Image (tube, rainbow, N blue to C red):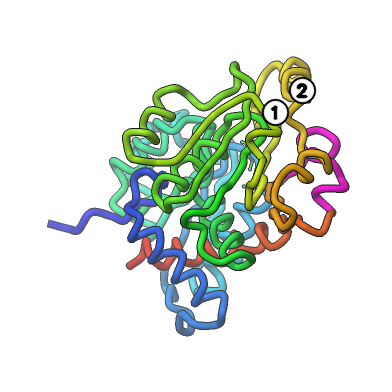
Amino acid sequence: MAEAPRHFLDLDRVSAATLRHILGLARDIKAGGGGDKPLAGKTLAMIFEKPSTRTRVSFQVGMQQLGGAVVVIGDGESHLGISETVADTARVLSRFVDVIVIRTDAPAKIDELADHATVPVINGLTDASHPCQLMADVMTFEEHRGPIMGRTVAWCGDGNNMATSWIHAAVRLEFRLRLACPGQFSPSPELMDWAAAEGGDVALSEDVGGTVADADCVVTDAWVSMGYPDAEARRRLLAPYRVDEGVMAKARPDALFMHCLPAHRGEEVTDAVIDGPNSVVWDEAENRLHAQKGILTWCLG
Ligand code: CP
Ligand code: NVA
């Protein structure tokens, strides 16, 4: 029987040892190792049902740098889930390509794709999580500050897909995570219970000052993620969670600032913070390329 494909679906579904292995691959590849064109002859299909700049370009460039080829399928450009079931598309794509990245609203669609694909499937973001981004974020933290294990990361704002992947990462990679989110936009009790049951050090409150106190890294993200309704109500409720210089001043003096981007300057973060000396957002964006080359290399064995 053929070996099961190595999917990269969510950080809570990958072991800590594998995450560490992938981060090691990413670091080696960034440093110039990893061999010449190790994925020559392989093809990546990318399906985007939502917009993307970083994920799309970094996967495309990364696959090409590894020697492989790429096919990009934009929203509404294939039969996926419209005139063909997700399962049937998975079966067909598996006959053409060696690995699939998908960005879509629904996690269930990725699961169905992965269940029926005979090649690895990578989660390029859903409304529920963004695991590839977290690999770049951890890589960036460790480049600037050394091992993340035992350090403290503070999240301010919407308890969204990025917050979920930060929770998964904190549990798997054993760092402290403090989240400040308004009650109605908090990570689910089920997710917080999972983190506690796994022995994670993850805490949630509505107090921004207390959350960022002593943090080694402050993180935020959009208040209105792609496709979210009620933008104005969200902006009103999330305004007290903006990361400005006053918030950064309550964290450690050398606290990094991170944001997965795209940033909404003046909403979740001020110009002074994102353009300030502690911001590492451009390194974080660049590391999408290296981290995903690590992910592709691991998925393709
Ligand atoms: N951070 C991130 O995933 O960016 P894109 O939406 O541009 O891919
Ligand atoms: N939370 C954001 C992340 C974008 C990369 C969104 O889903 O729109």
2 or 1: mark nearer the eye: 2
Say which amino acid is labelled 2.
Answer: Arg
Proximity of marks 2 and 1: CB atoms separated by less than 8 Å: yes
Give the crowd class for mark 1: few <14, some 14-19, many >=20 residues within 10 Å: many
Name the residue rendered at 82%, 48% in the picture.
Answer: 273
Name the residue rendered at 39%, 36% in the picture.
Answer: 195
Ligand 2 within 8 Å of disc 1? The answer is: yes
Asked if residue 197 lies in the magenta stretch, the reply is no
* Ligand 2 quadrant assignment: top right
- Residue 84 image position (x, y, % from top left): 40, 32
Say which amino acid is labelled 1.
Answer: Val
| Cα distance between the residues tagged 2 and 1 | 8 Å
Q: Secondary structure at mark 2?
A: helix
- Give the number of marks: 2
Ligand 2 within 8 Å of disc 2? The answer is: no
Name the residue rendered at 51%, 58% in the picture.
Answer: 148
Q: Is residue 123 above or below residue 143?
A: above
Q: Is residue 139 above or below residue 74?
A: below
Earlier residue among tags 2 and 1: 1
- State the residue in front, 73 or 199: 199
First to last magenta residue range? 262-275
Residue hosting label 1: 224
Residue 215 in the figure: left or right of residue 135: right
Residue 281 in the figure: left or right of residue 19: right
- State the residue in front, 264 or 203: 203
Give the crowd class for mark 2: few <14, some 14-19, many >=20 residues within 10 Å: some
Residue hosting label 2: 235
The image quarter containing residue 81 is top left
Name the residue rendered at 36%, 65% in the picture.
Answer: 300
Q: Is residue 193 above or below residue 285?
A: above
- Residue 120 image position (x, y, % from top left): 35, 54
